[in-house]
Image (cartoon, rainbow, N blue to C red):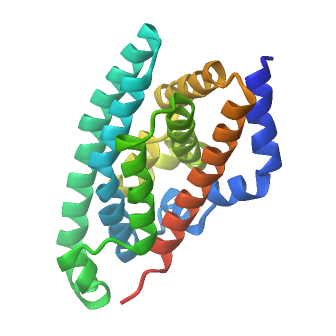
Amino acid sequence: MGAMQNFLDILFDKHKERYQKSITHPLTEEICQGVLPDVKLFTYLVQDLKYFRLGLNAFGKTLTLCDNEKSAIILGKQIGFICNDENDYFEITLKDIKSKSKEELESKCAFMLNQEPTLPEVQAYLDYLNYIVHDCTSYVEVATFMYMMEKIYLDWAEPHSSKSHCDKLPFKYSEWIRLHSGKKFSNWVCFLRNEVERSVISDEDRAVCEKTFLKTLELEIDFFEACYVYKE
C-alpha cells in the first residue's frame, strides 16, 4: 500500500464521524428508500442543478491541470457522461414532479417553484466551485475536491443499489441511485482516488489535501441539510 493511500485512509479514519454524516444524511437516506417527499426532492434538484454548469467547468479545470495523458482521456470521457445522463435525469424528473405535484409545490414551496432562489449554503458551495474553476492552480486541490464530491455520492448510493431494490422505486429515486453507483461509477471514483494518490507528494500537498477533504465534506453536509429543512 502506497504512502498516499495510507494518508487517505488516515483522513477517512481521522474524520470518520463527519464522513459518516455526509453519507447517511436523512435527505439521501430517504431518496434511497424512495420516501423523500416531492417538495424536498424538488428543492434538492433545483438547487443541485445550480451546480451543474460550474461542475462541468470543474471537470474541465481538472482536465486542464492534469499532467498525465491517460488520465486526461478518462476525464474527457466522464465529462461526456455527465452531459448526457445527468442532464437527462434533471430534465425528466423536474418536469415529472411539476406535473404530478403542482398543487403541493404551489402550497408549500411556491417561491422555490417560481423564483428558484439560491440557498445561502448552496451559494457558499458555488463560491468555492467558482474558486476551483477560475483561481485554483493546484491539481492536488482540484483532484481531492472531485474525489470527495463523487466518493460521498457513491457511498450513500451504493448500499441501496441492488437491482431488486431499485426496481421497486419510481424513476425519480432509482435513477439518481443508478447514476451514482455500480461498476462504472465505482471505477470513476477509484480513478479519482488514484489521481489524488499520485499527486500528493510533499507535506504541503498533504496539508492541501486534508483541508480540501474537510471543506468538501462540510459543503456537502450543509447542502443536504439546507435542502432538507427548507420551508416557506
Q: Is residue 34 above or below residue 106?
A: above
Place of residue 142 in the rendered image (x, y in percent of width and height, measured from the top left): 49, 36
Residue at position x 37%, y 32% in the image: 61
Residue 169 visible, this orientation: no
Q: Is residue 101 above or below residue 97?
A: below
From the viewer's side, name the closer residue of 183 and 55.
Answer: 55
From the viewer's side, name the closer residue of 156 and 9.
Answer: 9
Quarter of the image with the C terminus in it: bottom left
Q: Is residue 71 above or below residue 105?
A: above
From the viewer's side, name the closer residue of 174 and 27.
Answer: 27
Q: Residue furthest top?
A: 69
Q: Is residue 76 above or below residue 101?
A: above
Quarter of the image with the N terminus in it: top right
Place of residue 55 in the rendered image (x, y in percent of width and height, measured from the top left): 35, 44
Residue at position x 47%, y 41% in the image: 180
As drawn, is 162 to the left or to the right of 83? right
Residue 24 visible, this orientation: yes
Residue at position x 70%, y 40% in the image: 207
Corner quadrant of residue 196:
top right
Residue at position x 53%, y 58% in the image: 220
Tally of numbered discs:
0
Corner quadrant of residue 218:
bottom right
Place of residue 109 in the rendered image (x, y in percent of width and height, measured from the top left): 30, 84
Place of residue 189 in the rendered image (x, y in percent of width and height, measured from the top left): 54, 31
